[in-house]
Amino acid sequence: MTDDKLHFTSNFKESGFVFAPFNANEKAILFPIEKSECLTEEIKIENINANENTFLVDETSKENHINIVEKTIDKINKSELKKVVISRKELVKISDFDLLEIYKKLLHNYKNAFVYCWFHPKVGLWFGATPETLLNIKNDDFKTMSLAGTQVDEGQIKPIWKSKELEEQQLVTDFIEDQLKDISTNLKINKTETIKAGNLLHLRTKVEGKLSEKSDLKSLIRALHPTPAVCGLPRNLAKDFILENENYDRSFYTGFLGELNLDKKSSLFVNLRCMAIKNKTAAIYIGGGITKDSNAKNEWQETVSKSKTMKKVL
């Protein structure tokens, strides 16, 4: 950036790099292309080893997360809610902070993810390695995906997915299809597959189509964000429950980021597996989808597994 001002977009018609929060009612930060300097650098990542540090479990954080998950399950059983994504923030002290080394470790360990380092002097420093594409669009042709279900990669040739994860994945896919049917044509839903992201496996279903003439990029983004994979279903009810009960500000976690309208293309990614750095402390954000079949202690353990994605590089 050629200045330190905060620039925003609300119509997504500008060109540049966008960094948007979870709450779609808040403005998205924009690095306008005309105020940016684009540089290319080859980064060598050979002989990069992940840390094997042991981090103690915060028993208070564990108890709080289990309690809110149990509250969520109870709410789902007594309301129209089908799924709510509940998350938490974990603070980790950093003894020797090296920005480039952390970025190299993310690149080395998460080859199938969109890896980024983002900084603005009035916002702060963020890192991430996200496996989830929100949207790729060129002219009017777009691709997106539903991503849900998580298990630790134990080297299985054919991982076995339980009904809870399969149902959760189908809910996300159905939502995306329903959201897009009125603003697109030639909609195609591909077969669900297993993908790897770091030490975790996920279920993914690719979706593609063509934006209708009466629609635009903003309407497409608003239709997709926040997806049920980071919010829940029905979306508005789940979002209200999250804002009322999570007891912390997600900020840019589960928002989205990426290139906006560059060469008639936009590539946007959901901000998962991310952390914010401040005063030698990493705020790591993790969460999981809760349905009527969820088990609170298992959901806590899933967040512990997900947190290792970021802890390995600190």
Image (spheres, rainbow, N blue to C red):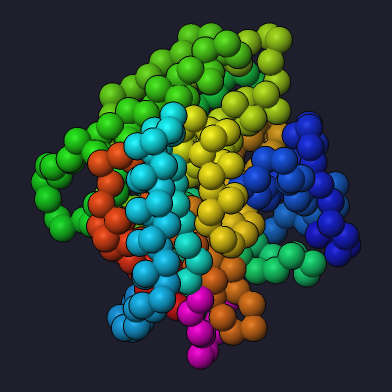
Q: Please provide percent x and percent y for residue 216.
A: 70, 20
Picture quarter containing residue 42? Answer: bottom right
Q: Is residue 301 left or right of residue 228?
A: left
Q: Quadrant of the N terminus?
A: bottom right
**x 47%, y 62%: residue:** 88
Q: Which residue does the image show at 40% across and 22% down from the upper left?
A: 174
Q: Residue furthest front?
A: 78
Residue 97 lies in the magenta-colored region:
yes
Q: Is residue 12 visible?
A: yes
Side of 1 where 296 appears, left or right: left
**Residue at (79%, 67%) from the top-left corner?**
122
Q: Is 303 a magenta residue?
A: no
Task: Please state if 304 lies on the left or on the right of 124 as rendered.
Answer: left
Closer to us: 180 or 60: 60
Q: How many marks?
A: 0
Residue 140 position by quadrant: top right
Q: Quadrant of the C terminus?
A: bottom left
> Residue 159: x percent and y percent?
15, 44
Return the x and y of residue 183 as percentages of the image width and height: 60, 14
Residue 202 appears in view: no
Is residue 216 depicted above or below 240 in this figure?
Answer: above
Vertical side of 149 occupied by 273: above or below: below
Q: Residue at x 84, y 51 (%)?
A: 7
What x and y, as percent, mark residue 240? Answer: 58, 42
Looking at the rendering, the stretch of residues picked out in magenta corresponds to 91-100
Query: Toward the viewer: 100 or 295?
Result: 295
29 is higher (above) or lower (below) than 124: above
